[in-house]
Amino acid sequence: NAGVTQTPKFQVLKTGQSMTLQCAQDMNHEYMSWYRQDPGMGLRLIHYSVGAGITDQGEVPNGYNVSRSTTEDFPLRLLSAAPSQTSVYFCASQPRTPGVLFFGEGSRLTVL
Amino acid sequence: GEDVEQSLFLSVREGDSSVINCTYTDSSSTYLYWYKQEPGAGLQLLTYIFSNMDMKQDQRLTVLLNKKDKHLSLRIADTQTGDSAIYFCAEISNDYKLSFGAGTTVTVRA
């Protein structure tokens, strides 16, 4: 099993560009989520999904879109990148046990 | 809303015990968690404790929960250089979302 796979690992964007961070898991987990990690702020929830076809907003959803067409994939789209979106992004999936998250290795995004 | 607080840094000598402290605010949290993040990697679940327990031990790790004071701690016995990492405390809300603290960076010195 590969677990949770995120791509790309690194990306540099210019302000106003759009891009998609990919996330895939092969553990058949229903619950998936996206977090951003900023220094001194821990992880903040952007969007999450409790199953295919169902998504919901987390704590900091503005500027991001998600979709969940399959159980395996949960891409995160930046619609028009801003410097405030410079961060490390983590995708996670979760089995039925509450709070037991499996994280990807992260995607480091820099917006100039 | 939930608010999880941790001290940001801890320096410990190799072989000593490390104690990382955390306070949380949601008294309805059913589980509390400790995650570890090594440099350049994602978070990994270290251990978790159910709210009706006050202690859990797993090899070198001991978790203590004081529900009255909403205080959680993680003790690492015989700290090794491989324990250098960021440790996150997290609590879970009723809708199964996790709230993370800012993380405690543990540095192990020889």
Image (cartoon, grey):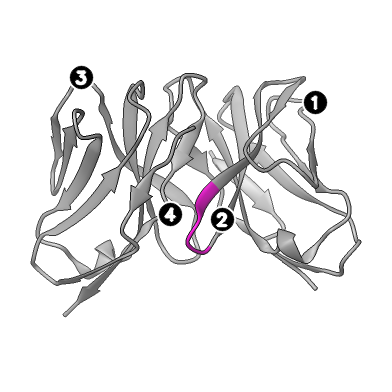
Badge 3 density bin: few <14, some 14–19, many ≥20, Cα 10 Å: few
Looking at the image, is mark 2 or mark 1 earlier in the sequence?
A: 2
Q: Are marks 1 and 4 on the same chain?
A: no
Disc number for residue A3: none
Give x and y (percent) for residue A51: 67, 20
Kindly report which numbered mark, 4 or 2, lies closer to the viewer in this rendering. 4
Q: Which residue is mark 2?
A: A37
Q: Which residue is mark 1?
A: A69
Chain containing the residue with disc 3 = B
Question: Can residue A108 be seen?
Answer: no
Q: Are marks 3 and 4 on the same chain?
A: yes
Magenta residues (range)? A39-43
Chain containing the residue with disc 4 = B
Q: State left or right for residue A39 relative to residue A54.
A: left
Quadrant (top left/top right/bottom left/bottom right) for the C terminus of chain B: bottom left
Vertical arrangement, residue A103 with respect to residue A10, above or below: above
Badge 2 density bin: few <14, some 14–19, many ≥20, Cα 10 Å: some
Q: CA distance from mark 4 to mark 2?
A: 9 Å
Badge 4 density bin: few <14, some 14–19, many ≥20, Cα 10 Å: many
Q: CA distance from mark 3 to mark 4?
A: 25 Å
Q: Which residue is mark 4?
A: B102
